[in-house]
Image: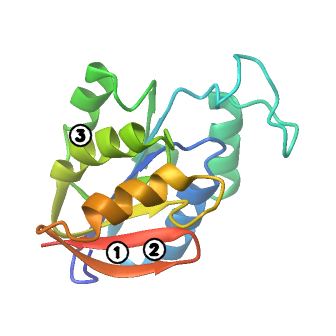
Amino acid sequence: MSLKDKHLNYVEIGVLFGINSAIVWDLLRYAFESATITCIDPLEGYYDADALDTLVGLPINETVLRQNLAHAMCDMEQVTILKGLSEDPEIISKASKRSYNYLLIDGDHSYDGVRRDFENYAPMVSSGGIVAVDDYGADEWPEVTAYCDRVLMEHPGYEVLSKTHRTLILRKS
């Protein structure tokens, strides 16, 4: 992603409560003339439907997501919520209607889950765009690190920009 871009097109896989999306909106919206956010999540978290998050005790649903984004003063007309699994062909099709300059992968933390998300969504990232993989290096998510180390670190189409604080950041060639 370059600050020469006039428009931020951000897509996040694994939104949960929308905190990352809100932070990106708040930090980057002033660096661009305009911004859009695409949120991809089944919005049932990684628990059963209607279960509360064990850390914060809130339900994981679209209402909470929308409230959090509104509290962060996101322009909800610029937010697209795709409710479903990132591997669902319908979700992939809907997401592919635009090109992105920032992709955050934070969904299924299995080796194959990260692989599928990268293979399905990285082609939607424009040249010079950023691909970030959350929970890289986190002890509790070893398969995220394994996929990144085995595949992404040496991927010919990407340059590693950073691998600190639980996040691998790549720039697409």
In front of the other: label 2 or label 1? 2
According to the image, label 3 marks what residue? 120
Location of residue 23 in the rendering, given as x and y in whole percent from the top left corner = 59, 65
> Is 107 positioned to the left or the right of 56 in the image?
left
According to the image, label 2 marks what residue? 28
Q: Please state which amino acid type lies under the numbered disc 1.
A: Phe
> Is 26 positioned to the left or the right of 100 in the image?
right
- Identify the residue at horizontal 47%, vertical 53% (top origin): 144
- Identify the residue at horizontal 88%, vertical 37% (top origin): 57
- Identify the residue at horizontal 30%, vertical 78% (top origin): 160
Q: Residue 32 shows which numbered tag? A: 1
CA distance separating discs 2 and 1: 7 Å
In front of the other: label 2 or label 3? 3
CA distance separating discs 2 and 3: 25 Å
Say which label, 2 or 3, has the lower sequence index. Answer: 2
Identify the colour scheme used: rainbow
Q: Please state which amino acid type lies under the numbered disc 2.
A: Leu
Q: Residue 114 shows which numbered tag? A: none
Label 2 crowd (10 A; few <14 / some 14-19 / many >=20): few
- Image quarter of residue 159: bottom left
Location of residue 66 in the rendering, given as x and y in whole percent from the top left corner = 63, 39
* SS state under label 1: loop
In front of the other: label 3 or label 1? 3
